[in-house]
């Protein structure tokens, strides 16, 4: 079943002591345009996120929002600057010697008070693990997002299907009315010639020839056959699991072209009214297809 290009999905998980939230939303667009907004410190995972989105979405303007609360995962790491501490210890011993022959012992507490002997840093994160966690939550958000698009797509398919039925009804009306226009033209032509020629005998072959020429000019058999073919293809696309928006958009242009051709060929008020209704349905269907992935 077709999917809509408009959708929203959200997922939240706590993985490896990180609270990760991912939101996915999209609107109509001719091609796929994916934008990812996430904390700068996790920018290394942006390419992996975009690849996941590209596998799930074929077109649309997709925005991905990622927030991460990693306060629980922060691990402090205390390091000792051994070289600097040794220099401080040597300096203290040297000072002790200047003060006299008394015994002096340098203690760790003394050295720890000096600047830069001890430093506290954040432990390095496992980038692969973090990226995998982000993608896992993203997959959940994409599942919810695609579920919403499928529901919207089912509604679009129902509406487009009803309009295809209307187009078939209008096509049937054109097919039924078209032969009648030729017969009416033949009667009008005969009456006009009788009125002009009055007592002169009318050549029936000439009437038949004129009617045949007129019938050839207003024949719409090819157009109605193509219309029904396009409608059948569109119905098949509605049931497809593959993205069909671009193909449907192209076919609707062809349906509109056939409708215009029928309107220009048939110099008949009844058919003209049918064509107006036909083109109105095509235009409404075109608007709906703009939402199809």
Image (spheres, helix red, strand yellow):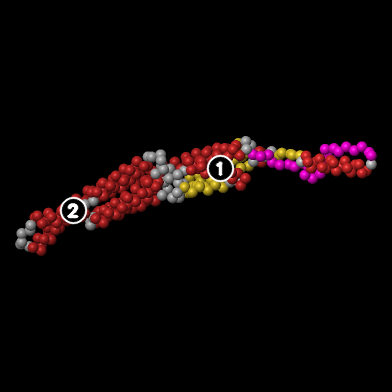
The span picked out in magenta is: 101-125
Q: Residue furthest top?
A: 16
> Which quadrant is the N terminus positioned in?
top left
- Left or right, 15 with respect to 190, comes to right
> Residue placed at 44% from the left, 50% from the top?
30
Residue linked to disc 2: 215
Q: Indicate the quadrant where residue 115 lies.
A: top right
Q: The residue tagged with tag 1: helix, strand or loop? A: strand
Residue under the point 53% across and 48% down: 35
Residue position marked by numbered label 1 in the rendering: 22
Q: Position of residue 184 (x, y in %)?
A: 17, 54
Camera-side residue: 271 or 91?
91
Name the residue located 57 percent from the left edge and 37 percent from the top edge: 132
Q: Earlier in the sequence, mark 2 or mark 1?
A: 1
Quadrant of the snapshot with the C terminus: top left
Position above or below: 267 against 78: below
Residue drawn at x 63%, y 42% is: 69
Are the two marked residues, 2 and 1, in contact with CB atoms closer than 8 angstroms?
Answer: no
User: Looking at the picture, how far across and down is residue 233, in whole percent?
Assistant: 33, 43
Query: Which disc number belongs to residue 110?
Result: none
């Amino acid at each position: 079943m077709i999917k809509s290009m408009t959708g929203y999905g959200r997922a939240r998980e706590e993985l490896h002591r990180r609270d990760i939230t991912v939101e996915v939303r999209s609107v109509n667009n001719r091609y796929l345009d994916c934008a990812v907004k996430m904390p700068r410190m996790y920018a290394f995972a942006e390419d992996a996120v975009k690849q996941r989105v590209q596998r799930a979405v074929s077109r649309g303007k997709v925005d991905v929002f990622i927030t991460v609360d990693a306060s629980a995962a922060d691990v402090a790491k205390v390091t000792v600057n051994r070289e600097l501490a040794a220099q401080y210890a040597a300096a203290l011993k040297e000072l002790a010697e200047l003060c006299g022959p008394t015994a002096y012992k340098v203690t760790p507490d003394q050295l720890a008070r000096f600047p830069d002997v001890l430093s506290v840093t954040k432990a390095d994160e496992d980038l692969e693990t973090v990226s995998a966690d982000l993608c896992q939550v993203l997959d959940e958000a994409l599942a919810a997002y695609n579920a919403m698009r499928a529901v919207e797509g089912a509604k679009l398919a129902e509406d487009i299907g009803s309009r295809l039925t209307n187009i078939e009804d209008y096509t049937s009306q054109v097919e039924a009315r078209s032969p009648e226009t030729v017969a009416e033209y033949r009667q009008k032509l005969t009456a006009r010639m009788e009125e002009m020629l009055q007592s002169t005998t009318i050549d029936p072959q000439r009437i038949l020839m004129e009617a045949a020429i007129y019938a050839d000019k207003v024949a719409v058999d090819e157009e109605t056959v193509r219309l029904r073919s396009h409608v059948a293809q569109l119905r098949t696309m509605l049931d497809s699991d593959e993205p069909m928006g671009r193909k449907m958009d192209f076919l609707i242009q062809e349906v509109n072209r056939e409708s215009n051709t029928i309107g220009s060929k048939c110099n008949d008020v009844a058919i003209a009214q049918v064509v107006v209704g036909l083109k109105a349905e095509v235009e409404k269907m075109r608007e709906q297809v703009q939402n199809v992935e």
